[in-house]
Image (cartoon, coloured by chain):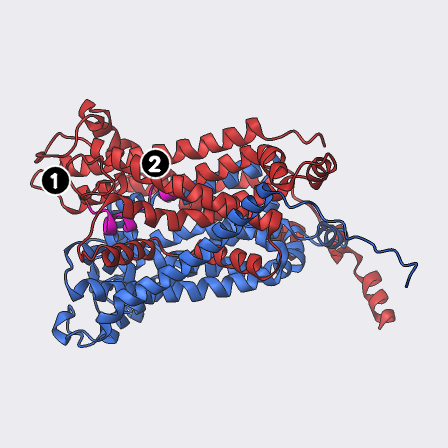
């Protein structure tokens, strides 16, 4: 066996894959540009000959990338052998997957900006409600107020519960209860948002014996169900990062456990916890389905969480889209402007969270 | 016995502050379990009337609850399955790109870009799907039906609006991409560096290193990440409700104007006008959805928990 192998190696030393040729360093980039150029030229000729109606940039990039995948595989196969060729093909495919995923994001942000800005910039958008508005004009003030109130209350309820549970899981929890909580918190993150809305409806329609109940506080409860698991998970991760030496130092100085947690553990991880809370707010602030069910929709201002229907921004976007009046365009404009407002809020919350995490994170001196 | 020193067990003094604090943490921890139980109980209680409702109370030609919810459950599973079919390969590609291909300094920022997709509210995805995606893909659908109409899934007549099951599946795929990507990325990064270096040292190319070291290590993680994505796709409401032109039948064709709607979208569209036992029927379909997603999520979590190291990823 070994004898035949050595004779084979001496007989054909040049086919050894380890000594095969290698493509120059920048060849992928050059091949990519070349294949784009070739496809572009192809489409250009098509346009000149009148076979196609116009020059398509999208088509050029798409088919150019396909050509690139084939070209780099063949080129590498010829020069470097099949293993390197496969490697280069996968590199190309993986990069393409990443770019493909970014396309919807950019398309979505771009369309929202273009369609949303006109109505977003009208002064009445943030100063008026939709009361008695038919067709053009009016604004989303009632929806903004509703979103702030409902999300605010949801945050007020879920942050203490979530944070205390996270403390229990990291500092106290041992045994069956802790494991059950960890497991079901994870499961709870997967509850569909509409089920949370249905739960709030089922609960309050039974409590108040009102089969058609709609009010803002119910929406806050529904959001709480969705928000608690996110708060627990993120806070737990942050609390786990606090080094044990800090706790032990505090115990050695005779500090009781609860004061250690309050004065040492929490301040150390505060930045991370605040970050987690902001991200969890950004998760629930865009929820539509539960609020559509339990908070309903209205065209008027409502500051009372416990009475009457309450409008929120996501539901505003949906109803403006779904119940278009005679003047279709102004309804669509308002829907896109609402969407733009939502995206801005969510992105600001996310960015703010990152900034806080970066600035206030404890320097552990490692 | 007489000389044995009574060794006192050292125990910290129980201060009232300690007692109050630890009790309050236990209470709020248990409250979470209570909330989850309450969700199940209240939904069940409120949906009981639906199981014995009059046949004429159901919309469409269903005569009992199970006939009513069956096609909806089919639509839910079918669109979620299609979405997963598209999302999982791309998500694994992205996760590999971020963990093993992108330059180290860029990797975190690129991951953050993908996470931004998760932050976009679903109602905005709905607007985008109907305003941008559906008109964009409609011409392709026409071609698909023209060329591949012999294939059962692509049978005509083609929808003129593009508001079909396939469009919904694409939107859902975009929406579940970030969660699958985030989880797979975490798992790929946990591959022991020694495995990777060993296979590279043996002369493996990067792709061979990934197939031999990274993917076998992360297989369980990829499965559970996909199941979490499945849970998300099953429960997605607004995007489906806005994009799909719905009907209440079992239809496999992807490109016609007759599309099976999902449980969640059906609730969102009909709840505002529902009354009487109609509300209970919708609540009961919600209960079915809750049970389906709960089972999917629990299976996913059990798989994750079997390998403790993954639990940090979410």
Display colour for chain A:
red
Residue A13 screen position, x and y as percent: 80, 57
Q: Chain of mark 2?
A: A
Residue B92 forms part of the magenta stretch: no
Give the number of marks: 2
The chain coloured blue is B
Q: Give residue A302's quadrant in the image.
A: top left
Residue B161 screen position, x and y as percent: 20, 53
Q: Where does label 2 land, which residue?
A: A343
Region rendered in magenta = A284-296
Residue A252 vertical placement versus B97 (above, below): above
Residue A294 forms part of the magenta stretch: yes
Q: Where does label 1 land, which residue?
A: A328
Residue A187, can we see it? yes
Please report contact status of discs 2 and 1: CB closer than 8 Å, yes or no.
Answer: no
Report crowding for label 2: few under 14, some 14 to 19, many 20 or more residues within 10 A (C-alpha).
Answer: many
At 22% from the left and 70% from the top, the residue drawn is: B50
Report crowding for label 1: few under 14, some 14 to 19, many 20 or more residues within 10 A (C-alpha).
Answer: some
Pick the front one: B265 or B52: B52
Residue B19 as seen in the image, left or right of residue A13? left
At 92% from the left and 58% from the top, the residue drawn is: B3
Tell me the quarter of the image containing the N terminus of chain B: bottom right
**Marker disc for residue B88:** none
Q: Give residue A49's quadrant in the image.
A: top left
C-alpha separation, residue under disc 2 versus residue under disc 1: 23 Å
Circles 2 and 1 on the same subunit: yes
């Amino acid at each position: 066996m070994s004898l035949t192998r050595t004779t084979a190696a001496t007989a054909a030393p040049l086919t050894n894959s380890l000594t095969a040729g290698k493509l120059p360093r920048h060849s992928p980039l050059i091949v990519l540009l070349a294949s784009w150029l070739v496809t572009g030229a192809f489409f250009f000729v098509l346009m000149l000959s009148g076979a196609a109606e116009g020059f398509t940039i999208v088509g050029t990039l798409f088919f150019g990338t396909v050509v690139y995948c084939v070209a780099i595989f063949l080129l590498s196969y010829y020069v470097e052998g099949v293993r390197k060729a496969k490697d280069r093909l996968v590199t190309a495919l993986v990069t393409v997957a990443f770019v493909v995923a970014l396309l919807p994001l950019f398309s979505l942000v771009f369309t929202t900006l273009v369609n949303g800005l006109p109505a977003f910039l009208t002064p009445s958008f943030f100063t008026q409600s939709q009361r008695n508005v038919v067709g053009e004009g009016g604004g989303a003030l009632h929806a903004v107020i509703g979103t702030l109130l409902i999300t605010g209350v949801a945050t007020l309820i879920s942050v203490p519960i979530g944070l205390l549970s996270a403390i229990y899981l990291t500092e106290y929890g041992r045994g069956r209860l802790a494991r059950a909580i960890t497991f079901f918190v994870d499961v709870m993150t997967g509850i569909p948002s509409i089920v949370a809305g249905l739960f709030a409806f089922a609960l309050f329609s039974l409590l108040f014996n009102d089969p058609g109940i709609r009010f803002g506080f119910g929406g806050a409860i529904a959001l709480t169900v969705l928000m608690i698991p996110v708060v627990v998970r993120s806070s737990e991760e942050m609390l786990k990062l606090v080094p044990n030496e800090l706790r032990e130092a505090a115990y050695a100085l005779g500090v009781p456990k609860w004061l250690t947690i309050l004065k040492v553990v929490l301040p150390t991880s505060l930045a991370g916890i605040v970050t987690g809370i902001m991200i969890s707010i950004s998760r629930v602030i865009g929820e539509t389905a539960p609020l559509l069910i339990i908070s309903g929709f209205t065209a008027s201002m409502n500051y009372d969480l416990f009475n009457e229907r309450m409008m929120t921004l996501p539901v505003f976007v949906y109803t403006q889209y779904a119940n278009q009046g005679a003047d279709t365009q102004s309804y669509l404009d308002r829907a896109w402007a609402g969407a733009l407002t939502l995206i801005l809020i969510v992105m600001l919350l996310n960015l703010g969270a990152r900034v806080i995490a970066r600035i206030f994170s404890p320097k552990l001196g490692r | 016995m007489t000389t044995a020193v009574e060794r006192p067990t050292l125990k910290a003094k129980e201060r009232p502050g300690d007692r109050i604090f630890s009790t309050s943490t236990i209470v709020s921890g248990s409250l979470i379990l209570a909330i989850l139980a309450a969700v199940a109980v209240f939904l069940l209680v409120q949906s009981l009337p639906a199981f014995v409702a009059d046949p004429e109370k159901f919309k469409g030609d269903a005569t009992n609850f199970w006939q009513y919810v069956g096609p909806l459950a089919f639509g839910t599973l079918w669109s979620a399955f299609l979405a997963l079919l598209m999302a999982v390969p791309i998500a694994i590609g992205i996760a590999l790109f971020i963990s093993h291909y992108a330059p180290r300094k860029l990797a975190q920022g690129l991951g953050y870009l993908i996470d931004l997709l998760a932050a976009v509210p679903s109602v905005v995805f709905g607007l985008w799907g109907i305003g941008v995606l559906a008109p964009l893909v409609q011409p392709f659908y026409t071609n698909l039906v023209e060329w591949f109409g012999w294939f059962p899934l692509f049978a005509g007549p083609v929808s003129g609006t593009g508001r079909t099951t396939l469009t919904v599946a694409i939107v859902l795929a975009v929406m579940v991409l970030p969660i699958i990507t985030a989880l797979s990325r975490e798992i790929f990064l946990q591959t022991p560096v020694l495995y990777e270096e060993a296979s590279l040292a043996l002369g493996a190319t990067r792709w061979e290193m990934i197939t031999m070291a990274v993917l076998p290590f992360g297989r369980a993680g990829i499965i559970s990440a996909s199941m979490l994505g499945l849970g998300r796709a099953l429960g997605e409401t607004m995007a489906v409700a806005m994009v799909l032109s719905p009907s209440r039948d079992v239809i496999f064709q992807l490109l016609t104007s007759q599309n099976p709607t999902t449980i969640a979208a059906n609730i969102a569209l009909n709840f505002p006008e529902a009354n009487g036992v109609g509300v209970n029927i919708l609540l009961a379909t919600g209960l079915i959805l809750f049970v389906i997603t709960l089972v999917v999520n629990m299976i996913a979590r059990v798989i994750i928990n079997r390998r403790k190291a993954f639990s940090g990823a979410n």
